[in-house]
Amino acid sequence: MRAEHGDFLAQWKPGPRLTGIGRGLLDLILPPRAFDGEPALTSGLSAGAWSRIVFLDGPVCDGCGAPFPFDQGEPLCALCLARPRTFARARAACLYDEHSRDLILKLKHADRTDLSGLFARWISRAAPDLLDEADAVVPVPMHRARLLRRRYNQAAEIARPLARAAGRPYLADALVRKRDTVSQGGKSADGRRRNVAAAFAVPDRRRPLVEGKRVLLVDDVLTTGATAEGCARALLAAGASAVDLTVVARVTEMRTRPI
């Protein structure tokens, strides 16, 4: 069901015209503020917050999106050369640090779904090649039990406007999380892989949507890659030709230690 992925029906939401009128009236009373809480002339981040985000604009590893200090001529980092990943390529908009983390956690835990459009624009800027080659966009799914507690899936909130802007099919329910896995926080890379082992699947009725397609998987943060690899494995087993990954932020290194 569509609600399992946070892709709820739209009739309970105000329409764009009503939303625009409400926003205009609010701006007459209170000056517009950026997402980080500072005054701003337009929506987004204040100049100070923008300068603190470490965007990954330079050369990166084609396999995991890790930043290179310079263009070294090799498309893959040492880790990806030593252990190829299930997903083909990965891109991240920025590094995961104290500045980006605060914004991401606002979306993830503080009902700030208004940040999803901003993050989608960041990803569009960081991964234009992945979007151009994608046949469909799929969010990392959330288990139904957790969705009931949180009320929305942050990956779906980012993936939906990303797919719409790129003109790509958005497959909200092509991938499901079969088990309500515990949080990945604090686990080692091996522990994360064990935690999500066989946790994802493509329902039989959705297999035709991914068969022969290059799928772009969307999530908020890339840490060890265990969740993304579990998702990619399920999509490939269902017949996807390849799976690429894009996220808002990634840790500096694909950690093997608990964080």
Image: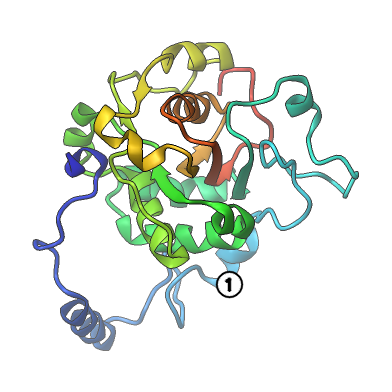
Q: Number of callouts in the render?
A: 1
Instruction: Judge whether residue 165 can be spotted in this image.
Output: yes
- In the image, residue 123 above or below residue 140: below
Residue at horizontal 25%, vertical 86%? 24
- In the image, residue 99 above or below residue 10: above
Residue at horizontal 45%, vertical 63%? 118
Given residues 113 and 121, the one toward you in this image is 121
Instruction: Judge whether residue 53 can be spotted in this image.
Output: no
- Position in image of residue 108 (x %, y %): 35, 44
User: Residue 203, located in which quarter of the rendered image?
Assistant: top left
- Position in image of residue 44 (x %, y %): 46, 70
- Position in image of residue 86 (x %, y %): 58, 26
**184 with respect to 254 (left or right):** left
The residue labelled by disc 1 is 47
Residue at horizontal 38%, vertical 55%? 169
Looking at the rendered structure, the kind of residue marked 1 is Ala
Given residues 216 and 26, the one toward you in this image is 216
- Position in image of residue 122 (x %, y %): 54, 60
Q: Which SS class for mark 1?
A: helix
**114 with respect to 231 (left or right):** left
**235 with respect to 173 (left or right):** right
Q: Where the N terminus falls, by quadrant?
A: top left
Residue at horizontal 69%, vertical 36%? 63
Task: Identify the residue at the far bottom of this view.
Answer: 28
Task: Identify the residue at the far right of this view.
Answer: 72
